Image: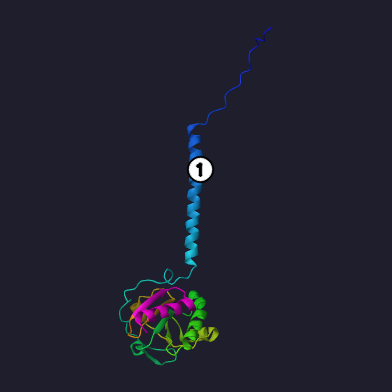
Amino acid sequence: MSDDSPVPFSPAPPSSTGSEVNRRRIAPIIVLVVAAVLGGLFWVLAASDSGSPDEVGLVDSPLIGRAAPSVRSTTIDDAPFDLARRKGSWVVINFFNSTCVPCKAEHPALVEFVAQQATFDDGAEFYTFVQPPDDDDDIRAFFAERGGNWPVVRDDDGRINVAFGVSQVPETFIIDPDGVVRVRWAGEINADILSQLVQQQRVAYGA
């Protein structure tokens, strides 16, 4: 006797809609895009911490390749200073203010750089130029606390800062023995990079 009882109905599994298929296709792409963005961000951060003098701190200036501006002033010890009379030597000048937080952070590196240059017969001369407003007593206290015995040059009316195009300290310039500006560095710098930059310019200059 055959069994003619009806077979139970089993509904077919629902098919994926078009929107679900699209979401499944797009999801891997989103993951790849996010990964690429994060990878790029990591690369940028790594590059910013590298300290390479070719990529960090070096900035353009109309002064590059030209004679340094005329600077006649006095130091905080009331000694006369004339930048033009420094021709024949490599000169590094650093613009600073005693209240500037990055200047305070940078100062130990400058002390180290000056000590390095003092070991060479023809080491670079180093000078600090003050960005006004600043007070001689505050500057003396700054150096007494943190060290450093190089000349500090006044700029009471701000003309020197304007002539060099300095708007925010610290900034550092390298000037060759002909009195020509060779390097402008904006922001903090460390002793090794500054020494490297001076040496690179010596080689390019041929001395």
Q: Position of residue 93 (x, y in %)?
A: 41, 82
Q: Camera-side residue: 9 or 169?
A: 9
- 57 relative to 135, above or below: above
Identify the amino acid type marked 1: Ala
* Left or right relative to 109: residue 63: left
Place residue 179 in its image quadrant.
bottom left
Local SS, label 1: helix
- 51 relative to 178, above or below: above
Q: Is residue 114 visible?
A: yes
Q: Is residue 158 visible?
A: no
What's drawn in magenta, residue-wise? 181-207
Q: Position of residue 153 (x, y in %)?
A: 41, 86
Q: Which residue lies at the image location 48% right of the left edge and 60% below the top edge?
A: 43
Q: Camera-side residue: 174 or 206?
A: 206
Q: Which residue lies at the image location 38% right of the left edge and 75% below the top edge?
A: 184
- Taking the view exactly as shown, the residue that stands out farthest to the left is 66
Tell me the quadrant of the picture where the C terminus can be found: bottom left
Q: Camera-side residue: 72 or 134?
A: 72
